[in-house]
Image: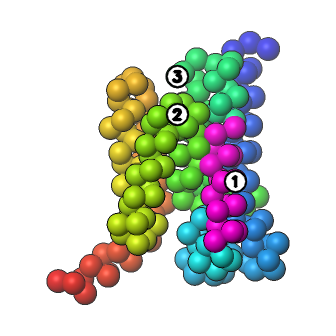
Amino acid sequence: MGENGQLIFFCVIGYLFGSIPFGKLAGNIFGVDIQKKGSGNIGFANVRRHLGWRAGVAVLAGDMLKGYAPVALAANYLTAGWVLIVAAFVLSGALFSVWLNFKGGKGVAATVGYSLAINFLMGTAAGLIYLAGTAFFRKSAPASLVAVWTLPVMAIFLSWKHGLFYLLAAIVITWAHRHNIQQIKRVAKWFR
């Protein structure tokens, strides 16, 4: 199999892994449709809120793993630039899951996961920034946005391709948070 064939293979694997809806699966185990609870999101924060910490942490770990595994595997066969394409397919799967009629989560945990595979220090820093942001804001959405917007700044030191990829990823993830951003704006009005 040539490099083009390998790229196609890993892109398909990346999308399918990214599509795994761990939050939905956790809800099914508990007999709860997590998409009909709270924000309707299938990610860590909504799962933790409605199913408890253990389920939330399990979903977080699963979402990070689905980002990490295909990209780490692809890195053994493809050049760094092509690995970023695989990461883009992982993010696409997380946002537009084939198992959920092309709906999905916000892609933040998957992004931390594939970032760990691309550059361990950068991925670790993003994860720590998210945790610090959650402690500061007491909300997942603003912490997520801060974390994903610090990634392009860090990634530019790897290469311009990495910087551009993470900039585009941050824009897409911000779009996925558009409803959360509206809620944040409404809450902010009360403090004016």
Q: Main secondary structure of the magenta part?
A: helix
Q: Describe residue 156's horizontal placement relative to residue 76 as left or right.
A: left
> Please, what is the three-letter code of the amino acid marked with disc 1?
Gly
Q: Percent position (x, y) of residue 107? A: 56, 53
In terms of secondary structure, where does tag 3 sit?
Answer: helix
Residue receiving disc 1: 62
Any magenta on residue 130?
no
Q: How is the image coloured?
A: rainbow
Q: Quadrant of residue 52?
A: bottom right
Q: CA distance from mark 1 to mark 3?
A: 25 Å
Q: Describe residue 142's horizontal placement relative to residue 69 as left or right.
A: left
Q: Are marks 3 and 2 in contact (CB under 8 Å)?
A: no
In terms of secondary structure, where does tag 1 sit?
Answer: helix
Q: Please state, as top left, top right, bottom left or bottom right, where the C terminus lies in the image.
A: bottom left
Q: Which disc is residue 81 wearing?
A: 3
Q: Please state, as top left, top right, bottom left or bottom right, where the N terminus lies in the image.
A: top right
Q: Are marks 1 and 3 in contact (CB under 8 Å)?
A: no
Residue receiving disc 2: 120
Q: CA distance from mark 2 to mark 1?
A: 18 Å
Specify which label sits upstream in the sequence, 1 or 3: 1
Classify 10 Å Cα crowding around label 1: few (below 14), some (14-19), many (20 and above). Answer: many
In this picture, which residue range is highlighted in magenta? 53-69
In terms of secondary structure, where does tag 2 sit?
Answer: helix
Tell us which disc is closer to us: 1 or 3: 1
Question: Is residue 90 in view from this perspective?
Answer: no
Q: Nearer the viewer, residue 36 or 67?
A: 67
Q: Percent position (x, y) of residue 173? A: 47, 54
Vertical relation: 52 (above or below) 60:
below
Tell us which disc is closer to us: 3 or 2: 2
At 40% from the left and 24% from the top, the residue drawn is 158
Question: Is residue 60 in view from this perspective?
Answer: yes
